[in-house]
Amino acid sequence: MQKTSLIYCLPFVCVTSQAANLYHQSSECTVNPDLETIRVSSLYTDIRGKSQKTIEEEAKLLTLEKIQAKMNEHNSDYVIKYVSFKYDDKEFVNSYVSLQPVKSCNNAVEINRKYVHRLHSKIINFQGKLDLDTTTTLKLRGQPKAIMPLSIKDVTVTHTAPFGIELGASYASAENKVGHFSALWPVNNTTKIAFLGRQNAFIFQNDKLTGYQFNRSLLPIDLRNRIELIPQQPIFSFIHNKEDVSVDKFINAEQLDSLKKYYNNVQTVNLKVSDTSVRAQLEGLSIGTELSTQLKVNMMPCFDGKTGIDQFIDEHESSLLRVIGFANKVSYITGCSQSIQLHHSGKVHSMELFEPLSQTNGFLHALSNLLAPMQNWSYSGISYGDSQQALRDFKTKIKDNGVIEVDSQNWVGVFNVYENTLANATLYPKSIL
């Protein structure tokens, strides 16, 4: 392994300095057990008016600069153990890197300013030529939180079996029919609601499917948008004029009368489909038991920072609202308006502190009961609606448009401020491994 020499020439003398080398995780390295793993985080915000390519390159150069400074402090070469970049094309790029000290490396793949693109990319060797796989998500550990892919084999809904799942089926057998549910809400000790996509809710009581509700707007928009979209839409089957009829979107008046004989709480809305034509769209219905307005809802746990955030998830995940979102990313929503997103490895990626959920445009039965215990966010002595002065004990940097960057001992993040009060935030724990 060859050290890189940097030569600085002053008027009367030249000084040679040994710069530490950084290696890609695909390198075959011997770890140095005498030195500890080091971690580096950076927050890049100078993105206004720049192309995505420029933003990514400059963010990686900033991260590399911090890595190099940290490595030089320890006078050792390092190999990437873990790397993560969080891109928000409107506000910032946030990065975390974990580095292992090494004694030597074979087949070393170096990362430096010339090859900064190798940071946060998996390198594939095609006949001895290095190339970049920019579509592969880096996964250095096992995936304890890995989920089964969606596998919806039957989209038919009848008055006794939604998506081919008979009323009375267990939760496990129901989930097996579809691969995975998109969200799971533990309502109380006997009741839970499983969502398939954003429009289908399955009611389980004492581990048995007792009801199903379809609505094109089941949940409030902010909550709805967190849940994955599914490619398949339900097809509702019933008997009309002694014939089997299936409806997915539009329905005529005669069919509607027949549909109501098989389904409960049928709702439609008239849509103008042309200058001269208006059609009725099926908007919602239910079968089996519906959630009562007398429903008792357990308060979900809140993360207060007194334990490690990963430990909090391990201890309370069965009591939290689990959501599967874009790219199969799993999040857990707490009882204090906190959404904790996980890496595919199962470690915590970030925590969002979101504004109070509105019941507007949410038509899930007993929605008001479900949202009633939800409290406004509070974390590390900071609460929703506080003046931005509440951040005075932290290292802050005020950006444009009401954005404040915050750096504390355990996390970095971005707070959004409206009318001088804290509205929401996204925080990234520094200790990611």
Image (cartoon, rainbow, N blue to C red):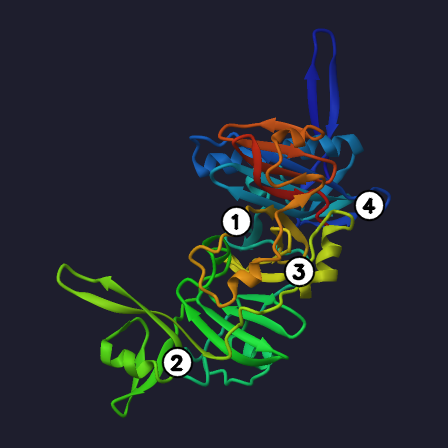
> Dot 1: within a 10 Å radius of its alpha carbon, few (fewer than 14), some, or many (20 or more) residues?
some
Residue under circle 2?
Answer: 263
Pointer 3: residues within 10 angstroms few (<14), some, or many (20+)? many
Secondary structure found at label 4: loop
Give the spatial CA distance, label 2 vs label 1: 53 Å
Q: Which residue is mark 3?
A: 299
Q: Is residue 322 above or below residue 38?
A: below
| Mark found first going from the N terminus, 2 or 4 | 4
For residue 132, which numbered disc appears in the image? 1
Q: Amino acid at mark 3?
A: Met
Which residue bears the numbered disc 4?
32
Residue 297 in picture, x, y percent from top left: 62, 65
> Residues under labels 3 and 4: Cα distance?
47 Å
Element class at badge 1: strand
Q: Are marks 2 and 4 in contact (CB under 8 Å)?
A: no
Amino acid type of disc 1?
Leu
Residue found 42% across the figure and 57% down from its top: 361
Is the Cβ of the residue at disc 3 closer than 8 Å to that at disc 2?
no
Q: Nearer the viewer, mark 2 or mark 4?
A: 2
What is the CA distance from the residue labelled 1 to the residue labelled 4? 28 Å
The kind of secondary structure element at disc 3 is loop
Q: Residue furthest front?
A: 294
Image quadrant assignment for residue 256: bottom left
Residue 423 appears in the rendering: yes
Among numbered discs 2 and 1, the one appearing first in the sequence: 1
Q: Amino acid at mark 2?
A: Tyr
Mark 4 residue type: Asn
Q: Is residue 24 visible?
A: no
Please, is residue 222 above or below residue 55 in the view?
below
